[in-house]
Amino acid sequence: MKPNYKTPDLDPAEVDPVDLPENAFTELAADETYRPVMHPARDYAEVTPYSVGVGLLLAVVFSAAAAYLGLKVGQVFEAAIPIAIIAVGLSNALKKDSPLGQNVIIQSIGACSGVIVAGAIFTLPALYILQTTHPEIVVNFFQIFLSSLLGGVLGILFFIPFRKYFVKDMHGKYPFPEATATTQVLVSGNGSKSSSGGQAATLVIASLVGGIYDYIVATFGWWSETVTTTAYSWGQTLADKAKFVFSCNTGAAVLGLGYIVGLKYAFVIFAGSIFVWWFIVPLMGAYGAPEIAAMSPDGIYREYARLIGIGGIAMAGIIGIIKSWPIIAQAVGLASRELRGASGKKAEVRWQSDISMKYISYFIFLALAAVLLFFYFGVIDTFWQALVAWIVVTVIAFLFTTVAANAIAIVGSNPVSGMTLMTLIIASGIFVAIGLSGTSGIVASMVLGGVVCTALSMAGGFVTDLKIGYWLGSTPRKQESWKFLGTLVSAATVGAVIMLLNDVYGFTGDNALAAPQANAMAKVIEPMMMGGSTPWILYIVGAILAVLLNWLGVPALAFCLGMFLPLSLNTPMLVGGLVSWFVGRSSKDEKVCKARMDRGTLISSGLIAGGALFGVFAALTIMCGWQVPDNGGEFLPQVLGLVAYAAIIAYLYVSSCRAKKS
């Protein structure tokens, strides 16, 4: 490694530390500096054929897996941690010399999968959903691909000017939970080989357990995928008379998701779900109009009760913008100062060198021009209507960029679905006012929503990548440059997988994928565009509820998200959160508890990744003609479902508690 830059306070001959410095997670004193693991004044192997190739391969694999899981349960798992573990395991197996820089690039490219998936599946499947009632709507691969690609590119470009504010200036002030976990995984491969190798083995075993478990139930139906009270005569009577239902998905992936989310947020999400299912639905069934009282609990939920949650999510997004306005103002000021001072500034140390603001400005111009051309030639026939849509996308995507990044930095969760819902409501109102309505307005709104949603998702995910690079000492310019290629590959993969899953399962009907966010988007857009009645009262009730929750200190977004996700998917989230809680209190020794919690997070990541990957295999199996038995309401499969679910819960808990203090 040859010297690159020399600064008075950084000696190029200094030996690199094995672990993160003590001040990695704390605020710096006035005279204190942060020195990353990789020396800021030396060059390292980062972008190589190996790191780019592995990163792109993982981007394809995890894009397919995350798309399936997200459309099934409405939650997109963050791929950063499992990708980081795979990168460390591979580098050890191949005996790579000084692999840390390459592993950061692998993680950064591969992590495009989760963020692109979130942007695409929350909006674009709504076109397929609405196609059932409006067959004139045409959906093609290039609409899905280009909306994901252009949205991802905008998210990258809009966030780069704010990198220093979030990852450097705010050092120690934001917790960055996901970036912290991923960084710890990557740095574990910087020292002891046995430690990282053991982590990789644990992840592989958990992936096989979760994958085979979910593949069996999804393909062969040996037990019920969802246990429910309506499978029994007394439960069906309770549903008919009192509109009361309880259900729980028995999948391994959703259990692992609940473990990682933790008890606090899992409980809030579950509370929102039972508020709808055990209070709102029975009340509507008892005191609603005769046509509502005649509906099943699921029908009341889908047609009426869930709309309250949609209004709550939209208001939670507005509250988030208001709270984040000072951050947006600071970030814009930082970016403008950077641009004005770029020409006469001396070269930055490698560790702090971004793509030149001059080039960023050019690229933003080109990307926005491409979005306008895409809207005009591929979505909207009238130029001035396409121009209005372009203005809406530009303003909202830029405005919400720092909101998304701020959410990830603080709680590790991006409220992208709520912000996108609000975007769709605003955009649809504008489109109707300028004469763009009907099915053409539906397509325009959904594609516009896909671009905005992907841009916000990318901005939130990219702050994690760049914070990891800051802690470890990688080159921001290289992370930023190669993120575009990962976005391209992930967008193409997601487009193909969405079309495949629509052909195999569909997004409407009894056995369709849930696609809860896309269903919510469709529910909002259709009445606004087709001249029907819009349930503003239900939206307003949800908005008022979100304001009250925020006033009481309850996470409004999580609660309202639980209101429009099915109860069967929120119950296992709570179960996973409870397992996490018990693992964290399984010993009187705090260090033992922490080791067990970390191992549980690793196992849960494996359950999620394995369940999602094998879910794609299950989709391919069904596409080849395999018929899945419909036994969800039979007694024996229900009992076997409870037994199998108890077994996977026991595996997660017992295996987590095998960890010992370091």
Image (spheres, rainbow, N blue to C red):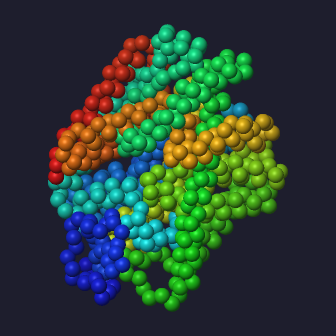
Query: Observer-nearest residue: 662 or 628?
Result: 662
Residue that appears at 37% across and 81% down: 349
Q: State which quadrant residue 27 falls in.
A: bottom left
Residue 584 spot, x, y in % from top left: 28, 42
Q: Is 282 located above or below residue 499 in the figure?
A: above
Q: Is 661 located above or below residue 129 in the figure?
A: below
Residue that appears at 43% across and 22% down: 227
Q: Is 460 located above or below residue 471 in the figure?
A: above
Residue 155 spot, x, y in % from top left: 55, 62
Residue that appears at 51% across and 30% down: 274
Give the residue furthest to the bottom: 344
Residue 291 spot, x, y in % from top left: 72, 19
Lateral position of residue 187 relative to residue 416, left or right: left
Q: Is 261 located above or below residue 25 in the figure?
A: above
Lateral position of residue 248 relative to residue 657, left or right: right
Q: State which quadrant residue 580 falls in.
A: top left
Give the residue furthest to the top: 233
Query: Observer-nearest residue: 83 or 33?
Result: 33
Is any atom of residue 101 visible in this view?
no
How many numbered discs? 0
Residue 655 spot, x, y in % from top left: 23, 37
Query: Observer-nearest residue: 393 or 579?
Result: 579
